[in-house]
Image: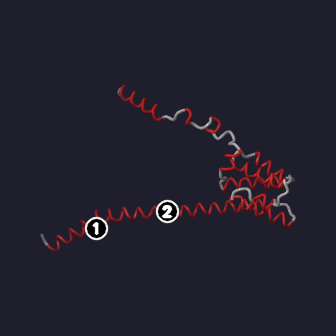
Amino acid sequence: MSPLLVAALAALAVLVAPRRSELPPRGRVLGRGAPSTDSARRQAATSYDVADALVLLSLALRSGMGQQEALERVAGSDPGPVAAHLRTVAAALRWGQPARDAWSHVPEAWRPAALAWEVAERAGAGPAQLVEDASWRVRDAEDRRLQSSAARAGVGLVLPLALAFLPAFACTAVVPVVMAIAHTVLGP
């Protein structure tokens, strides 16, 4: 490579590289460091995050922890939005709100957990098994949603392929054959 080309590429790299002020905070680059509580509340927990948290809640409840303690322990193990959601529910339960009201403070992704907690509260039983069952329902629903999206993507990919491939096939294979046959039959 010529030195002039190397210098031009180096200058281009310097111009295109992000400024230090545009980079994320150092701890967040590798996934370390918890976001602030307000930003975690605004972020949405994925369905798999919710399902994982529900399994942990079930295990904590089965180990003999109380409901608020289990919520706070699981919240302490997750630095993301799950922690903020679970702390909100734990605080609402600590203030004496019924399960329905306590779980209404978090996003809709937690609806299966809210139903499990509410049923357990009404039945006067521990919610551990119901919470675990809810985690499986959340996973199954997300898996079905992903499979449906994949199927729609497959159908969506076939349409452009058909619209591009079929005319090209007709122009390159069918039209020349028809023209050759017509030329042979009709004469020169």
Place of residue 42 in the rendered image (x, y in percent of width and height, measured from the top left): 66, 50
Question: Image point 86% across, 52% down: which residue?
Answer: 65
Mark 1 packing: few (<14 Cα in 10 Å), some, or many (20+)?
few
Question: Image point 75% across, 55% down: which residue?
Answer: 55
Q: Secondary structure at mark 2?
A: helix
Q: Quadrant of residue 129?
A: bottom right
Place of residue 92 in the rendered image (x, y in percent of width and height, measured from the top left): 80, 54
Does 179 sit left or right of 164 as displayed?
left
Q: Residue furthest bottom?
A: 185
Place of residue 102 in the rendered image (x, y in percent of width and height, measured from the top left): 78, 58
Q: The C terminus lies in which quarter of the figure?
A: bottom left
Place of residue 2 in the rendered image (x, y in percent of width and height, measured from the top left): 35, 27
Does 3 sit left or right of 39 as displayed?
left
Query: What amino acid type should be assigned to the residue bearing mark 1?
Result: Val
Can you identify the residue that label 2 sits on?
Answer: 154
Along the viewing direction, whichever of 158 and 21 lies nearer the viewer: 21
Question: Image point 64% across, 60% down: which residue?
Answer: 142
Dots 1 and 2: beta carbons under 8 Å? no
Q: Residue furthest left?
A: 188
Does 123 sit left or right of 166 as displayed?
right
Along the viewing direction, whichever of 179 and 142 lies nearer the viewer: 142
Can you identify the residue that label 1 sits on?
Answer: 174
Does 76 sit left or right of 160 as displayed?
right
Distance between the Cα atoms at labels 1 and 2? 27 Å
Q: Secondary structure at mark 1?
A: helix
Q: Which mark is residue 125?
A: none
Query: What amino acid type should be assigned to the residue bearing mark 2?
Result: Gly
Q: Earlier in the sequence, mark 1 or mark 2?
A: 2
Snapshot colouring? secondary structure
Looking at the image, is 84 positioned above or below residue 13? below
Along the viewing direction, whichever of 165 and 31 lies nearer the viewer: 31
Which of discs 1 and 2 lies nearer the camera? The answer is: 2
